[in-house]
Image (cartoon, rainbow, N blue to C red):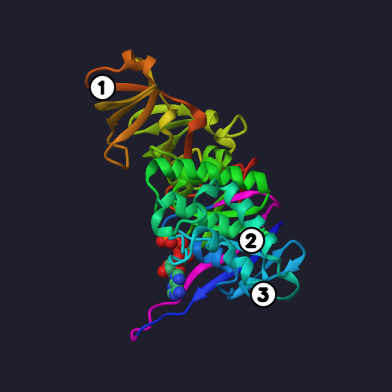
Amino acid sequence: MEVILQNLTKKFPGRGKKKQEEVTAVNNFNFNIPDGSLIGLLGPSGCGKSTTLHLISGLLTPTSGKIFFGEDDVTGLPPENRGIGLVFQNYALYPHLTVKQNILFPLENRKGKDRLSKQEMLSKAEEAARMVQIDGLMERRPGELSGGQQQRVAIARALVKMPKVLLLDEPLSNLDARLRLQTREEIRRIQQETGITTIFVTHDQEEAMSISDLIVVMKDGVVQQTGKPQEVYDDPLNLFVAKFLGNPQINVFQGNVKGEKLYIGKDAVLDIRDILGKDAGTEVPGITEKEVCVGVRPEGFVPDADGPFRCSLRGVEVMGRDISVVSENPAALSPAIRAVINSEHMSEIGSTEVRFSLLPHKVFLFDRDTEERIGFRGTQTEAVKK
Ligand code: ATP
C-alpha cells in the first residue's frame, strides 16, 4: 500500500497558565512512501517522528494536510478503520492474557462480516506467531517472557490483522544491544516476507540506516532530507544531516576558500574543483573567497607523511580491522578529530604529529550561516529544502 503525506502539519496549542508557545511538531511534510517499502523516520528527540507516526495511524488528527493510503483519503478515518498495525516501544501487551490470547485479541474484536470463525482465528494467530518465531511460547504470559520475546508478541499481534501499513514506534528501545541487532534484522525479514509497507521510527541512525529502503531525516518538525540511506550519507544536504548520520560523527572544521584551494587553518588541503566537481571552482558564485564549514567523514583521512593536513596526535584506538586515530587541530569545532583508517597505515603515524591527505568525496563544504551544503547537487537524493 502506497502512503502519501500531503502538506501534513500538526500544531499543538500552548498550555499552562503562562500559555507557552504553540508547537509545530510536524511542518508541511510531503512524502510518497512506496508500496512495500520500509521507511526509517529518523531524528533527535522532539523532532516530530512520533507525531508523524500518530498522524498516519489516526491517533492524532492533522492541523492541515492530507494522508492517502493508495487512492483513499484516510485523513478523517479513525485508527480502527485504517487497516494499520501499531507496535510501541513498551510492547503494551495485556499482562493477564497468554501470548496466544494477546495475538488473538485484535481478531476477536472484529464485528459483522469481518468476524472470523474460531478455527480461522487460531490458524492466523499461529501463522503470525511462527513468523516472529514465538510459536513455542503460546501458553505463557508476558511476564514470563524476555523483552525481545515480548516485542515479538507485539509484532505478531500487529501482523495478525494483515495490516495494510505497519507502524513501529521505537520498537527496539527497550532491548539490550545484542537483541536490538537481532530483532532489527528480524523486522526486516518479516517486512520483506509480508511486503507490508512499514514505517519505523527511531532516533538511532545506525538502526535506521541498516534496515530501511529509504530514510527521512527530521529536525524541529521539518523534513531535512529523504533518500536511500547510503545516498543521504554520501550526499548530505546540510550540516545537520551530515552530523546526524555516521558513527563516529563527521569532523567539522572552520575553513576558508581562497582562489581554488580549500584551507583548514594554514593548510591548503584540497582543490575546490576536486570537492565540488570539475564544473565548479571559480565558476561557482561566491565560492572563490569564502569562510566555510568543512565536514570530513572519519574515513576521509588518509595518513600520509607528506599529506597537507597536519594535526597533533592524541592517541590511537584499535577497533579490530580498523583503527581510530584521535588528533587535534585548532580549526576543529570539536576537541577531538576522529579518523578511521585501515591498520595497514599505522606505520604512517608519527609520535606527536599526524599528517593526512583528504579524500575529496568525503569532504563537504557548508555555508557558515545557513549550514546548507555548498555545491549540493542532490542528483541521487530527493532533498527537501527548508
Ligand atoms: P522522541 O524521540 O523524544 O519521542 P519525537 O521526535 O517522536 O521525540 P514528538 O513526540 O513527535 O517527537 O514531539 C514533537 C514535538 O511536539 C515536541 O516538541 C513535543 O514536545 C511536542 N508535542 C508532542 N506531543 C504533544 C502534545 N500532546 N502537546 C503538546 N506538545 C506536544
Answer with left or right where residue 68 lies relative to residue 383.
Answer: right
Which residue sits at x=60%, y=46%? 190
Label placed on residue 353:
1
Between 175 and 331, the residue placed more toward the observer is 175
For residue 77, which numbered disc appears in the image?
Answer: 3
Q: Earlier in the sequence, mark 2 or mark 3?
A: 2
Q: For the C terminus, which image quadrant?
A: bottom right
Residue 75, image quadrant? bottom right
- Residue found at the far bottom of this picture: 17
Q: CA distance from mark 2 to mark 3?
A: 19 Å
Indicate the amino acid at tag 1.
Glu
Specify start and end residues of the magenta stretch as a single range: 17-40
Q: Is 374 placed above or below 12 here?
A: above
Which residue occupies 73% across, 76% down? 112
Q: Is residue 366 visible?
A: no
In the image, what residue occupies the spot 55% across and 67% down? 54
Separation of marks 2 and 1 at Cα, in angstroms: 49 Å
What amino acid is found at the position of numbered circle 2 in the picture? Asn
Identify which residue, 105 or 349, lies in the foreground. 105
Residue that badge 2 annotates:
30
